[in-house]
Amino acid sequence: MNSKQELKANEYEVKGDTAYIKLRKKDGKIIDTKIDTDDLKMVLDKGLWFPEWNKDFNSYLVQSLVYSPGGKKSKEKQSLHSFILGVHTKTPIRHINGDTLDNRRCNIEVYNQNAVVNDYEDVDSETIAIILRDKHGIKKEKTLIDKEDLDKVINSGYSWVYYVSGGKHHAVANSPEGRIFLEKFLMNPSEDMITKHINHNTLDNRKSNLNNVLIVEEPEELQDSGLDITE
């Protein structure tokens, strides 16, 4: 099946199981978003869809204006991916292949950053880079660990995520008891000690870069040491 029609809302083209909806940018240029053909009528009935640049995704998201019961447009927007999945527009959703204009159901999923096993990369024979993602599942940073700690970190029951505090970047896990910093998890300091990054790179969590020191020796480090897991 291959067809093309022009509707009041958006033009579209259907190729088998995939529909390509035409979106007009502010400069008048047209880009496509892909959806399942089975979702085409539902999506078009919702109204006009347009692309909007999102700095968090560094890409375009497909949006539609929400109408109030009186028929007036409100400032609230509905994202296409959340509309298709039937969830609130602020619900974190991950585009599996990284293409935010591919809104087929096989490519979108509700994302819970606290229930995901981290992926990782080999750096060298002794070092692993753990991938840290944000609440949308977007890769933000990497944290280095020793290869011998990989099993402990990956199979800890925690998901390690990207976190910024005091201008410093960290790998943390969000638990019911509070926020856990990876350096503290690895070094397990006593209550009167904190874990310090020797080279001041808070994403370098190799044991050679971590040192437990008495709190009285390094009081200025309290804010980024991970001592208070409920920070």
Image (spheres, rainbow, N blue to C red):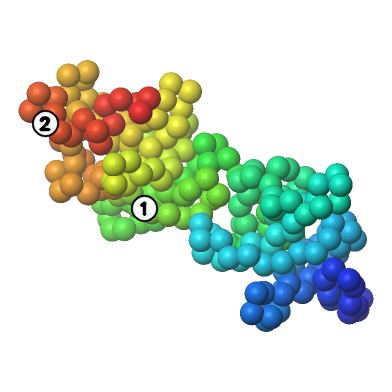
Measured as percent of width and height from the top left, residue 30 is found at: 71, 79
Any mark on residue 155, and which? none
Badge 1 crowding class, 10 Å Cα cut-off, few under 14, some 14 to 19, many 20 or more, is many
Decide if residue 2 is on the left or right side of residue 136: right
Quarter of the image with the N terminus is: bottom right
Q: In this picture, is 76 found above or below 157?
A: below
Residue at the (64%, 45%) spot, across then down: 90
Q: Whole-Å distance between the Cαs marked 2 and 1?
A: 26 Å
Q: Nearer the viewer, residue 158 or 81?
A: 81
Q: Is residue 64 left or right of residue 121?
A: right
Residue bearing the label numbered 1: 142
- Type of amino acid at the residue the image marks with label 1: Lys
Contact between labelled residues 1 and 2, with CB atoms less than 8 Å apart? no
Q: Nearer the viewer, residue 145 or 171?
A: 171
- The residue indicated by pointer 2 is 218
Q: Is residue 181 left or right of residue 6?
A: left
Can residue 213 be seen in the rendering of this structure? no
Quadrant of the image occupied by residue 205: top left
Which of the two marks, 2 or 1, is nearer to us in this view? 2
Q: Identity of the amino acid at label 2?
A: Glu
Q: Nearer the viewer, residue 111 or 49?
A: 49
Residue 32: % across, % down: 72, 73
Give SS at disc 2. loop
